[in-house]
C-alpha cells in the first residue's frame, strides 16, 4: 500500500474518529485505526465494538491496500507536524514508513484480519429529519441519562418515532426529560434506546442546517454525517414506563425568572453538603427562598428570588446539582414549576413552549433534614 496525503487533511479525518479509540482494551487491535484505500481517498475506521466511526481523507493513491496503524502514535505525529505532504509506504511485514520533506518515521502496523468488521446495515428503516431539530432534542435530553451500568436502559435516550411526532425521553430515576416535536411525519413507527456516548459524538458533528439521515438496523443505528459515519449498538432493554411517574394533578404553580433562579441556585449550592447537595426551597406568595447548610463545615447560604406562587407557603428539598442541570437546559426567560406536596415530583416547564414543541422536565424531591 502506498499513498500521499496532506498532513492537514489526514489530521482532520483522524480527529473525527480518534475519540472512540479505547485507552485500554483487552483486544489490542482496537487501539489501531484501519486505513483503507477507496476511490482516491483513505477511509479511516475506529471502533470500540459498541461504536464505530468512519471518516475519509482525500489522498493520492499509487498502490491500493489496507493496514491498521496505532491510533495514538499516528495522531501524535500528525499533531506535531506543520502543513506538509506525507508519503506512506506499507511493506509485506506491515511496517509503515512515513516520509515528509524533513523527516522519516517507521511504525509497526497490523494486518486488517483481526480488526472488527463494520456493521452491515440495510436502509429499509430510514428517516430524515432536520439536523437542527435533532441537535436541539439531544441537547435537551441527554444530560438526564444515568451513568449506572447496572441499569442499562437508563444509560441511553429513548427515541420514539410515530406517524405525526418524534419524541426523546431521558431519565436517571431522579430527573426526567421528555421533548416532543409535533411538526414531524414519518411512515416509520420505531422506538429504540440510543446510548449516551453515541449521541454526544453525534452532537459534535451535527450541522446547524439541512437534514440528518438516520438508519435503523436490528441491533445498530447509523447516523450519516457529511464528513463521517457513526454506527452504534442499540440498547436492547425494556425502557421503564415513564408516563406513570409524570404527575398530572400538580396544582400549585410557581412562576419564576429562570436566570435569577439559576444564578441564586449556583450561589447557594456552594453551601450545600458535598455528599447530598441538598437545597431547601421555601416558597411564599411573592418569593422563593433558597437555603443550604453544610453541617460538616458549618457553612450556610440563603437567598431570595422574586416569584409568584398560587398556593399556601410551601417547602421542598432538591438536589442542587440536578436542579441546576435542569435550569441550564430550559431556555425561556420565565419557567413554570408545578408542585403538589413535598414528596411528589415537581414539573419544570417553559412558560412559553416553542411552536410544535412540548418540553417537560421532572425532578424528584429529596427528604429535608429538620
Image (tube, rainbow, N blue to C red):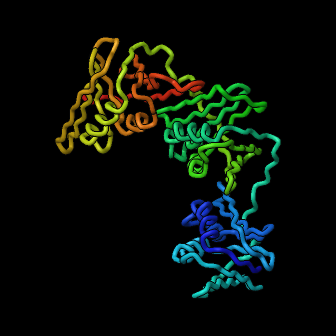
Q: Residue at x 57, y 46 (%)?
A: 196
Query: Does the image show residue 343?
Result: yes
Q: Dividing the picture into quarters, in which one does residue 158 lie? A: top right
In this rendering, the answer to whether 366 lies above or below 203 is above
Q: Where is residue 183 drawn, in percent x and y? A: 66, 27
In this rendering, the answer to whether 209 lies above or below 179 is below
Q: Where is residue 92 drawn, in percent x and y? A: 77, 85
Quadrant location, the N terminus: bottom right
Query: Does the image show residue 73?
Result: no
Q: Residue at x 73, y 75 (%)?
A: 67
In this rendering, the answer to whether 281 lies above or below 206 is above
Query: Looking at the image, which is closer to me, 225 or 27?
Result: 225
Q: Where is residue 55 drawn, in percent x and y? A: 68, 61
Q: Where is residue 323 drawn, in percent x and y? A: 38, 34
Give left or right: position of 324 versus 141. Answer: left
Numbered disc total: 0
Query: Looking at the image, which is closer to me, 125 or 235?
Result: 125
Give left or right: position of 158 versus 261. Answer: right
Give left or right: position of 208 versus 220. Answer: left
Query: Looking at the image, which is closer to me, 330 or 52?
Result: 330
Q: Dividing the picture into quarters, in which one does residue 251 lie? A: top left
Amino acid at each position: 500500500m502506498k499513498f500521499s496525503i496532506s498532513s492537514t487533511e489526514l489530521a482532520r479525518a483522524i480527529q473525527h474518529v480518534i475519540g472512540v479509540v479505547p485507552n485500554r482494551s483487552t483486544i489490542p487491535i482496537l487501539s489501531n485505526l484501519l486505513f483503507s484505500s477507496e476511490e482516491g481517498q483513505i477511509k479511516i475506521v475506529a471502533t470500540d465494538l459498541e461504536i464505530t466511526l468512519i471518516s475519509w481523507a482525500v489522498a493520492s493513491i499509487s498502490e491500493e491496500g489496507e493496514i491498521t496503524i496505532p491510533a495514538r502514535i499516528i495522531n501524535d505525529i500528525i499533531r506535531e507536524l506543520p502543513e506538509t505532504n506525507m508519503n506512506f509506504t506499507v511493506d509485506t511485514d506491515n511496517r509503515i514508513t512515513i516520509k515528509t520533506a524533513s523527516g522519516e518515521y517507521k511504525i509497526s502496523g497490523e494486518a486488517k484480519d483481526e480488526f472488527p468488521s463494520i456493521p452491515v446495515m440495510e436502509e429499509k428503516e430510514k428517516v430524515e429529519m432536520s439536523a437542527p431539530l435533532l441537535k436541539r432534542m439531544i441537547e435537551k435530553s441527554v444530560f438526564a441519562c444515568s451513568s449506572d451500568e447496572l441499569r442499562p436502559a437508563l444509560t441511553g435516550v429513548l427515541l420514539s418515532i410515530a406517524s405525526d411526532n418524534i419524541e426523546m425521553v431521558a431519565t436517571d430515576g431522579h430527573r426526567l426529560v421528555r421533548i416532543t416535536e409535533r411538526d414531524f411525519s414519518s411512515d416509520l413507527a420505531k422506538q429504540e434506546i440510543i446510548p449516551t456516548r453515541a449521541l454526544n459524538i453525534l452532537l459534535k458533528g451535527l450541522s446547524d442546517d439541512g437534514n440528518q439521515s438516520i438508519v435503523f438496523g436490528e441491533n445498530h443505528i447509523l447516523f450519516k454525517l457529511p464528513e463521517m459515519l457513526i454506527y452504534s449498538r442499540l440498547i436492547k432493554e425494556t425502557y421503564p414506563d415513564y408516563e406513570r411517574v409524570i404527575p398530572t394533578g400538580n396544582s400549585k404553580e410557581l412562576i419564576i425568572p429562570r436566570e435569577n433562579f439559576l444564578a441564586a441556585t449556583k450561589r447557594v449550592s456552594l453551601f450545600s453538603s458535598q455528599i447530598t447537595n441538598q437545597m431547601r426551597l421555601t416558597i411564599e406568595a411573592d418569593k422563593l427562598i433558597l437555603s443550604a447548610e453544610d453541617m460538616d463545615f458549618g457553612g450556610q447560604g440563603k437567598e431570595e428570588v422574586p416569584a409568584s406562587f398560587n398556593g399556601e407557603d410551601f417547602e421542598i428539598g432538591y438536589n442542587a446539582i440536578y436542579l441546576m442541570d435542569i435550569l441550564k437546559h430550559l431556555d425561556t426567560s420565565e419557567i413554570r414549576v408545578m408542585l403538589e406536596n413535598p414528596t411528589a415530583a415537581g414539573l419544570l416547564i417553559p412558560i412559553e413552549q416553542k411552536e410544535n414543541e412540548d418540553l417537560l422536565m421532572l425532578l424528584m424531591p429529596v427528604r429535608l433534614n429538620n
